[in-house]
Image: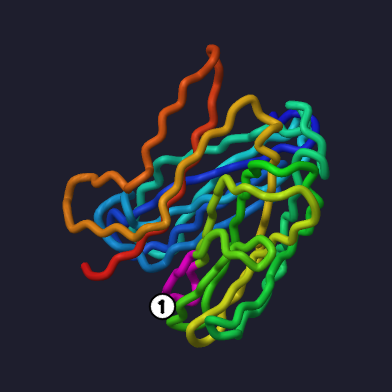
Amino acid sequence: PLPVGDNLLIYAASGGLVTGTPVLSIRATFAAAETDECIESGFASGGPYGAFGFSGFKIVTGDGLNIAKLQFNRSGTGTFDVSAASVLSLPLEALGLIEDTDYWFDNGSDTETSVTTADPTFTTVTTLNATLPETGGYLVFGVANFRNNSNVVTNIRYSMDSTVISTNYEQDTSTVSQYSTPFVKLITATAGFHSFKVEAARISGTTFVRRARICVIKASAFSQVISTNSTADQSTSSSTFTKVTSSEITYNPSQSESILVIANPDANISSL
């Protein structure tokens, strides 16, 4: 069970086609209520790797009794694999963090927002206004769930005070599939008022966005936070793994402790 108070619930899984043409649904739940769902109807063959990824987060209120789960099902014919399934809860209040002092969040809405604006004109889906108490590091989490009504390229971006923090492009030809576009980044922000946004645009047709969420956590609320990131594009045609520039970081714990490791890349395929 999740401890009493606000918890940052983080979940992830991947799925891939084995045989047939199934439609796969993966969802996260807390206290038997759905917190997020992704659906894939256009699988590539070859097992769980690279076919479909699902991840996201939500701030949920624990009562010491209810639990969080990952669940999945399939419709259509055939079978699929689900792997790398994980659920993690960071107990913010149990760790002594205080809302609007150490962390801020907006869980978005389960109701879809219809986005017809064409890139580079964006529609604001969720806004989180926060007055930060100090200049320094802040962990920014963002995610949005979306689907399309045609062969649409969807652009989901996250910003602070109109400065883009992260951007994610997705394309799909299915009207059934639903995807999520999560990210996390350690940024530096000045003390005072800041406006964080989840925004969306499309290339053609219409995209529908829901559960667009933002969470900001003061880095100094933890004993140690280290981060690295690379914005440079890299490409590979190798069948072996290639390290992303600046993706390696060294952590030297000052004591025996549990640590939370989060990594998120943006990737696309130019040809098959």
Magenta highlight on residue 173: yes
Q: Quarter holding the C terminus?
A: bottom left
Which residue: 55% across, 68% down?
A: 156
Across and down, in percent, residue 195 comes to: 74, 61
The amino acid at mark 1 is Thr
Which residue: 72% across, 41% down?
A: 31
Tell me if 252 is positioned left or right of 112 in this view. Answer: left
- Above or below, 192 relative to 222: below
- Above or below, 45 relative to 200: above
Across and down, in percent, residue 119 comes to: 53, 82
Q: Quarter holding the N terminus?
A: top right
Seen as rendered, the residue at the extreme top is: 256
**Magenta region: which residues?**
168-177
Q: Quadrant of residue 92?
A: top right
Which residue: 78% across, 27% down?
A: 96
Across and down, in percent, residue 94 comes to: 76, 27
Which residue: 41% across, 40% down?
A: 84
Tell me if 190 is positioned left or right of 150 in this view. Answer: right
Q: Which residue is mark 1?
A: 173
- Above or below, 208 relative to 49: below
Count of all numbered marks drawn on residues in the image = 1
Q: Nearer the viewer, residue 65 or 139?
A: 139
Q: Around disc 1, counting alpha carbons within 10 Å, would you say few (fewer than 14), some (14 to 19), or many (20 or more)?
A: some
Secondary structure under the numbered disc 1 in the rendered image: loop
Magenta highlight on residue 46: no
Q: Nearer the viewer, residue 191 or 33?
A: 191
Can residue 32 be seen in the rendering of this structure?
Answer: no
Q: Quadrant of residue 97?
A: top right
- Above or below, 178 relative to 251: below
